[in-house]
Amino acid sequence: MMKGRQIPRIAWPLFALGLILLFNLMFTDSFFAITIKDGHLFGSLIDILRRSAPTLIMAVAMTYVIATGGIDISVGSVLAISGSIASLVVWGGNTQYLTSAGSQYYAPMLSIILIPLVASILLGAFNGVMVSFIGLQPFIATLILMTAGRGLAQLLTGGKVLNFRHAGFEFVGRGYLFGLPFPFLLALGVIVLGTAITRLTPMGLYIQAVGGNRSASNFSGVNTRLVLLFVYIFSGFAAGLSGLVMTSDITGADAGFMGLYMELDAILAVVIGGTPMEGGKYNVGGTVIGVLIIQTLTTTILTKGIPTEYTLLVKAIVVVVVLIIQSNKMREVMGKRQGKMMVKGGSAI
């Protein structure tokens, strides 16, 4: 008897993304229109790529965290800290003379980029130490930083919204390179970096081994503590980079709202993309599709003029449908039906 092959996990997110794009093709005017102005590409699709960049950067790193059986719900707060520090560096560390016009102080670009990233990496290392060396549950460990980090960001800015003007830094979130939005190119760079580390070194296998069975990995000689430390450091780095992109895009930092709930979008994108929450496997390509589903859906909702209070509800419904369709139980049912159809087809011949 012929056995039906299970449909790959990535097929359902692709199908969902295709449906959303088909809807826009039929009901949204000029959704696929792309124009060239001053050597830059513009249009709804290009806007989706640009606006999805911060979430995509965080979601790629979140993929590896979840693959180890962990989770990092502190990335939104780390993003806020990174953006707050970047704004402070632009301000020269002094918010006493804050005006609505924003800072005109031109701090060195290297300082604006490196200081927030180093701080974010250290925060990621804190999470990693809490999980791998102290032994706290990932949810509890990152919840600590999620709560304290948001307060720290507000302390850094003195509870103010820091606006600034800095042409060089603004390019990070608003610029274009080779006709494409620079934030999207940064996201591609993070994808390439993560793929290189996990494909060209044993780290990818170690991540899956730790997620599959941490105790067995220890017995087989894998340094599970260093593996866990790495994924949380990488997650902190990604959140910090997302903070730089978002801060430079809006030319300011609002510590109370920057990155709020973005950790949920990152986690949803990973799960939609087919990476199981129990760990042991990961699918970065699926995560990319998951992010595009979330951002394309958000853009569609805004384009159709749906009130913002319904945005989260519509996104939740679509996400739940996709997750149900690609669940193990549904995949087993679909596989059995496919097998029966193949058997009937074979017997008919």
Image: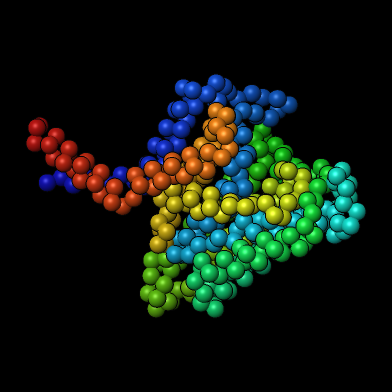
Query: Going by the picture, which residue comes out furthest to the right?
Result: 97
Q: Can you say whether 26 is above or below 81 in the image? A: above
Q: Position of residue 54 (x, y in %)?
A: 62, 47
**Figure colour scheme:** rainbow
Q: Can you say whether 154 is above or below 296 in the image? A: below
- Please indicate whether residue 313 sits to the left or right of residue 344 in the image: right
Toward the viewer: 341 or 293? 293
Q: Can you say whether 41 is above or below 2 in the image? A: above
- Please indicate whether residue 39 sits to the left or right of residue 110 in the image: left
Query: How many numbered discs, if any?
Result: 0
Toward the viewer: 309 or 141? 309
Q: Position of residue 86 (x, y in %)?
A: 76, 55
Q: Position of residue 199 (x, y in %)?
A: 48, 57
Which quadrant of the rendered structure holds the C terminus?
top left
Q: Going 63% across and 39% down the picture, which residue do you hit?
A: 50
Toward the viewer: 307 or 298? 307
Toward the viewer: 60 or 165? 165
